[in-house]
Image (tube, rainbow, N blue to C red):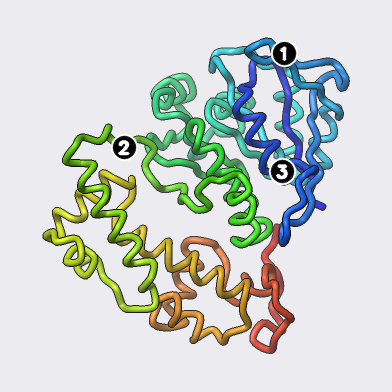
Amino acid sequence: MQRIALLAFPGIRVFDVSVITEVWGSERALPGVPPFELRRAATAPGDPVPMPGGLTLTPDRPLDWLEEADLIVVPGLVDHETPVAEPVLDALRRAHATGTPIAALCAGAFVLARAGLLDGRRAVTHWHLAPRLQARHPRITVEPDALFIEDDNLWTSAGTAAGIDLCLHLVRVAHGAEAAATVARSMVTAPFRTGTQAQFIEQPTPRADRDADTLAAVREYALRRLHEPLTVTDLAAHAGMAPRTFARHFTAATGTSPLRWLLDQRVAAAQRLLERTDLPMPEVARRAGFGSEVTMRQHFASRLATSPRAYRTAFSTTAPSSDAAGNRPIAR
């Protein structure tokens, strides 16, 4: 059972606490999703931690439990200038020193920054706060647009919905795409937005709304034909646009380029096939639209830092086959 620590201290956002509880709450029993042990760690277990709106959160573990957790999640701050007690920062430093992954949602990045954990590393926060994080902590490389990012076992995310994206991604990393999709379905939310997708998309106009309808139809068209050798030019032709115009409108509507979106969908399709079937690797590559096992392996390495065979060994829901024999599961 994966042990998740929700770090509780005054000033944390109710929304982020709710997201963490929704994703890893131990009371949920979903098919194909392992049970989680979610604990709330704070300086004084049993003493209610105040949150906005007159709400409180009662912690049930002391700070030293962070060193026993498999993952620590830091909720965002309502006010990024809220002071954080030194014992909380010390606990984070100790946990990171032992190799425990730490994820901070939204302005929770400021907490990791105050602990000195983000110095010399890449990080992200809400786009509105990114300049302030960079100005106050110049040793951090602040990425202004990404939804979430990882550097040396430290995860940071942008605001609100990006926190959901990161939490689901962490489930995907630990337990596979199918488990993450099941949790997402239970929350009635999108199961897959990549961390590199842009945070901010311009407010739609009537013309943009029409373009969005066209682009949604193109994405549906592509998802039904991932096994075909689709190109951006093919998608542009289906939309009735010139390739450059299509790419510009697609990026404005989705926050990512057509090629990156198409490759991300192919990787996701391959993940599902590796988890649900015992098809040979060349057939998985063909059905996901990669054309060859070599190409699929290259994209798994660049996006997931693993190989298709290792991914299948770790997350397959089918009986072990000779195709996966002899491979070690993905390190967690």
Residue at 42% x, 61% y is 264
Sequence order check, earlier mark of 2 and 1:
1
Query: How far across and down, in percent of the image, does residue 231 sit?
Result: 26, 70
Query: How far across and down, in percent of the image, does residue 23 sit?
Result: 67, 43
Residue 146 location, quadrant: top left
Amino acid at the residue labelled 3? Trp
- Dot 3: what SS? helix
Q: CA distance from mark 2 to mark 3?
A: 29 Å
Query: How far across and down, in percent of the image, does residue 198 sit?
Result: 36, 42
Q: CA distance from mark 3 to mark 1?
A: 22 Å
Amino acid at the residue labelled 1? Pro
Query: What residue is disc 3 on?
Result: 24
Residue sitting at the far left:
242
- Mark 1 crowd level (few <14, some 14–19, many ≥20, 10 Å Cα): some
- Dot 2: what SS? loop
Query: What residue is disc 2 on?
Result: 201
* In-image side of 15 versus 241 (left or right): right
Circle number at residue 50: 1
Q: CA distance from mark 2 to mark 1?
A: 34 Å
Residue 21 vs 259, above or below: the answer is above
- Dot 1: what SS? strand
